[in-house]
Image: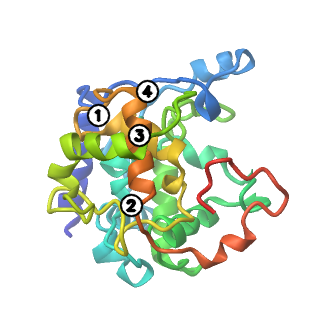
Amino acid sequence: MHRRSIASTVVAVVVLIASGCAPPPRMTGGENSISPSDTEAAANALFAPPSPETIPGDLRGEQIRLGYMMVVDTQGYGKRYVGNVLNCTNCHLDAGLNPNAASFVGISLLYPRYHERAGRQVSLADRINECFERNMNGKSLPHDSVKLTGIVAYIEWLSQNMPAGSTVPWRGVPRLMSTHQPDPLNGKKVYEQKCVFCHGSEGQGTMTAPPVWGPRSYNIGSDMARISVAASFIKANMPRGWGWTVTDDEAFDVAAYVNTQPRPDYPDKIHDWPKGGKPADAPY
């Protein structure tokens, strides 16, 4: 795609976010909550994606543009590393610019960091490759890959307005905290009422939205395969454009229904949480 076309698309997405098409991030506890000690730092952590005009016209700019295309058209630009039909932007909505959907803004400041599931320090590139292996049911990009370098460059560019040391209160998705026992049978009813038009009666997706189970969807090693994560994402973002319109209980029920359906295995799951800390709702 021509440089100007890519930049225009980025502009459009930024304008959508700025104009209020996505609700402001809502914190409900969990890993996204802000403790009193974080209040001062969080005050400096404004959700402020950079203007596309700041993309340089040099090699770094080309890396950023390639990274953007890898995110929005992973099937076209990264197909050899993908094992399903998803694009990164299916979870990182609006090319990582939606503060309620695992936004990329500010994320580069958090790496390297200790990752409990891996049991070690991981880099931003490592975390991206985890997404390819799990969410995309694919394989890691080589660490010297220009496509991996491009995604890192894109996330770093989106994070450039964040002050060093700031928290990223919109990290991940606004986490739901509930004592509700998820009911997949009721989830099926809610799915048929509110989800089937976009995701299909068999969960295999349509031209509008991706599959949410089956061989073309994320595998069981994905974060989204956890009911609590899927419920939080559903609550904040689904139906698309109508986030916050399902109840907390409905979100958990739909997540339970979707995540009890068949999906690909993840053979390397045997290496997860080597030092403990495995979440109670991990599906394996």
The mark lying in front, picked from 1 and 3, is: 3
Provide residue 269's location: percent of width, then percent of height: 66, 70
C-alpha gap between disc 3 and disc 4: 22 Å
- The type of residue carrying mark 2 is Cys
Who comes first in sequence, dot 1 or dot 3? 1
Tell me which residue sits at (66%, 35%) in the image. 164
C-alpha gap between disc 4 and disc 2: 20 Å
Q: Mark 4 sits on what residue?
A: 25
Give the numbered dot on residue 88: 2
Provide residue 51's location: percent of width, then percent of height: 34, 40
- Disc 4 crowd, CA 10 A, few/some/many (<14, 14-19, 20+): some
Element carrying mark 4: loop
Element carrying mark 1: helix
The mark lying in front, picked from 2 and 3, is: 3
Tell me which residue sits at (32%, 26%) in the image. 23
Disc 1 to disc 3: CB gap under 8 Å: no
Disc 2 to disc 1: CB gap under 8 Å: no
- The type of residue carrying mark 3 is Asp
Element carrying mark 2: helix
C-alpha gap between disc 2 and disc 3: 25 Å
- Disc 2 crowd, CA 10 A, few/some/many (<14, 14-19, 20+): many
Give the numbered dot on residue 241: none
The mark lying in front, picked from 2 and 1, is: 2
The mark lying in front, picked from 3 and 4, is: 3
Who comes first in sequence, dot 4 or dot 2? 4
Who comes first in sequence, dot 3 or dot 4? 4
Q: Mark 3 sits on what residue?
A: 253
Disc 4 to disc 1: CB gap under 8 Å: no
- The type of residue carrying mark 1 is Ile
Q: Mark 1 sits on what residue?
A: 17
